[in-house]
Image (cartoon, coloured by chain):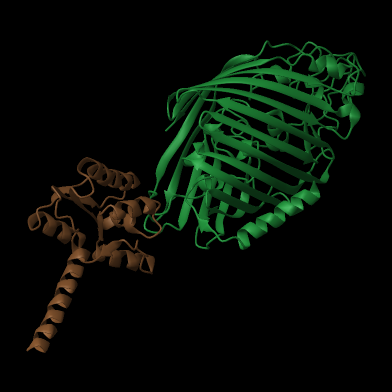
């Protein structure tokens, strides 16, 4: 009996750990966040790259690191923001350290790979998965995020 | 000096090949002008700048020699040399730069055209010249490749972006030794008045003049370069091979120009052209020039220099020493405007200029001269103080020693430049300069015509408006 309980305890603990780990990958772990903002970058204008990072930075300044959940979704020409060699990679790293999530569009990545002849190397802090616009729709309609497109 | 430069070349190789390095974003002239920030540059960024200016001297005339009483070239307004004061739009440049295919950050381009009235556009026909047209390939770590027409790796004064230059006019050494004029002849031939005098036949020929635009510190060729970061230091190198023919020209001989450049900079803060840091640099360029008319032949042309720049907080300073061997631009005969006919009695002019008076009418035409075997050197010191973002006060002292290897031909030019800059915003400013100019032939008596002429070098007032867009 005791052996049986121990076995189930281990299984339960493992499940909790796995579930927690999965959640930390797909959503920012900020239980006290007052605001949830998704920032869209889909523009080829280089100035917009700086602008979207500035906006994220300003939101953190206003609400604090734990007071706001921010996810930057890049698709179309805007995906260049998440290229590994992007000149803003230092700023991206800094925002990532402050809890900002970066999500890239896998459809865009595939299309770019066709044009380039190779898959562009992405910033390791970015998760490239699924269509970017679908991600935005989900965040806005299901998770209570506000969409901002600087 | 040659030994020192060999060491520099060795250091360049070592920096490029051995150092544990990390490529950095645009942060020096090589990178700022030759590359685009990775994955952030647009397909085509249109940019440019306009520099209208006013310059004035007293307009003192030539005091001695065959062209006595005539307009002095050194007191005349560039580039027309027809007046001693006036307005001019010295530069008006429009360019496009970026990445042809935005998702491929490894291929960059840079294009710039000059619409202003200066030594680039006045010579060689046409009123617009392409000054820069280059492509940079960033595929090889530590060895970016730039091909086309662009600024050559060299003197800080020439290599830096002109729209962040703290003064209006270049220093004597930079203007005389590095802002290259190209000629077909050396100016020593029978370049005499084409006008028939009383009882004399018309002479053949005309003044020796530039055969096209000035170099504008540019050449057409291929450059390998990169910048590396080690802690708070940045090291940059460049090796280039070019035609040695400046801009708007193809190759006219089989000789190639080689350029070597190295810099190390302690970066304090900021980025871009006005970054704060302490930089040390050295450079060398070597090649040959081919003359096809008077003095026809091939001649070595070597230039080298080293220096330092400093910018931190409210203070900025710079020093550079430049040395030259061969193809020394030696001004015009008697300080006259090229093409001017002398006004001395028959037979008198030749003894001053060395030019042959073919027609026997006593008149010779002033020409530009090139000392193919000459030597020269020079240096400048600069200090600037910016008490606030609006104002900057500058002072510069520069010395140019021309033809140091021939005592009778040696000329020494010393200039103090006092300057003020007022910034309307980060991209608009007005610059006011006053140059206290002194020139002499140090090895000739004061009574010599050369010194009488050089005594007439006036101080110069300049004001310039600069708008970058």
Q: Which color is chain B depicted in?
A: green
Q: Position of residue A143 (x, y in %)?
A: 10, 57
Q: Which residue is drawn at 15% across and 61% down?
A: A134
Q: Which residue is drawn at 64% across and 53% down?
A: B240
In-front residue for pair B84/B5: B5
Would residue B234 be seen by someone viewing this image from the given angle? Answer: yes
Q: Where is residue B36 in the image (x, y as percent from the top left)?
A: 45, 49
**Is B153 left, or right, of B303 in this rendering?**
left
In-front residue for pair B245/A33: A33
Q: Which residue is drawn at 62% across and 62% down?
A: B17
Q: Residue at x 22, y 65 (%)?
A: A25
B199, above or below B353, in the image: above
Q: Position of residue B452 (x, y in %)?
A: 84, 14
Q: Which chain is brown?
A: A
In-front residue for pair A44/A101: A101
Q: Position of residue A45 (x, y in %)?
A: 32, 47
Tally the numbered discs. Answer: 0
B262, above or below B370, in the image: below
B117, above or below B269, in the image: above
């Amino acid at each position: 009996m005791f052996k049986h309980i121990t076995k189930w305890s281990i299984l339960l603990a493992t499940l909790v750990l796995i579930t927690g780990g999965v959640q930390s990958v797909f959503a920012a772990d900020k239980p006290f966040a007052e605001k949830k903002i998704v920032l869209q970058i889909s523009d080829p204008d280089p100035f917009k790259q700086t602008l979207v990072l500035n906006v994220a930075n300003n939101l953190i300044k206003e609400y604090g690191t734990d007071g706001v959940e921010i996810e930057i979704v890049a698709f179309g020409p805007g995906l260049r923001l998440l290229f590994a060699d992007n000149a803003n990679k230092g700023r991206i790293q800094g925002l990532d350290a402050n809890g900002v999530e970066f999500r890239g569009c896998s459809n865009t990545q595939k299309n770019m790979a066709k044009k380039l002849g190779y898959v562009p190397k992405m910033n390791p802090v970015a998760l490239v998965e699924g269509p970017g616009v679908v991600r935005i729709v989900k965040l806005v309609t299901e998770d209570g995020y506000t969409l901002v497109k600087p | 000096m040659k030994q020192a430069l060999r060491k520099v070349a060795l250091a360049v190789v070592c920096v490029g090949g051995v150092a544990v390095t990390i490529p950095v974003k645009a942060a020096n002239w090589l990178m700022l002008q030759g590359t685009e920030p990775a994955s952030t540059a647009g397909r085509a960024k249109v940019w440019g700048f306009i520099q209208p200016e006013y310059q004035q001297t007293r307009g003192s005339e030539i005091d001695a020699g065959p062209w006595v009483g005539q307009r002095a070239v050194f007191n005349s307004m560039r580039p027309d040399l027809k007046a001693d004061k006036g307005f001019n739009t010295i530069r008006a440049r429009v360019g496009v730069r970026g990445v042809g295919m935005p998702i491929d950050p490894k291929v960059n381009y840079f294009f710039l055209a000059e619409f202003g009235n200066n030594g680039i556009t006045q010579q060689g026909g046409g009123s617009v010249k392409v000054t820069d047209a280059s492509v940079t390939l960033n595929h090889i770590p530590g060895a970016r490749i730039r091909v086309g027409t662009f600024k050559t790796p060299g003197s800080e004064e020439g290599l830096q972006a002109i729209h962040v230059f703290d003064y209006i006019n270049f220093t004597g050494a930079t203007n005389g030794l590095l802002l290259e004029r190209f000629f077909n002849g050396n100016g020593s031939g029978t370049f005499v008045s084409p006008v028939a005098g009383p009882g004399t036949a018309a002479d053949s020929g005309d003044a020796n003049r530039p055969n096209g635009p000035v170099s504008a510190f540019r050449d057409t060729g291929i450059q390998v370069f990169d910048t590396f970061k080690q802690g708070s230091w940045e090291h940059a190198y460049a090796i280039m091979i070019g035609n040695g023919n400046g801009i708007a020209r193809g190759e006219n001989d089989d000789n190639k120009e080689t350029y070597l450049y190295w810099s190390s900079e302690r970066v304090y803060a900021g980025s871009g052209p006005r970054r704060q840091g302490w930089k040390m640099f050295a450079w060398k360029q070597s090649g040959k020039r081919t003359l096809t008319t008077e003095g026809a032949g091939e001649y070595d042309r070597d230039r080298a220099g080293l220096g330092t720049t400093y910018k931190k907080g409210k203070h900025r300073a710079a020093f550079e020493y430049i040395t030259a061997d061969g193809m020394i631009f030696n001004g015009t005969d008697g300080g006259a405007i090229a093409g001017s006919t002398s006004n001395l009695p028959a037979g008198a002019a030749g003894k001053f200029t060395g030019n042959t008076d073919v027609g026997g009418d006593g008149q010779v035409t002033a020409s530009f001269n090139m000392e193919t075997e000459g030597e020269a050197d020079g240096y400048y010191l600069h200090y600037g103080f910016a008490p606030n973002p609006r104002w900057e006060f500058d002072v510069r002292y520069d010395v140019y020693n021309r033809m140091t290897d021939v005592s009778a031909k040696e000329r020494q030019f010393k200039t103090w430049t006092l300057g003020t800059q007022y910034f309307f915003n980060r991209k608009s400013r007005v610059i006011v300069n006053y140059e206290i100019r002194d020139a002499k032939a140090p090895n000739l008596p004061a009574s010599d015509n050369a010194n009488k002429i050089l005594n007439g070098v006036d101080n110069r007032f300049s004001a310039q408006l600069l708008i970058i867009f």
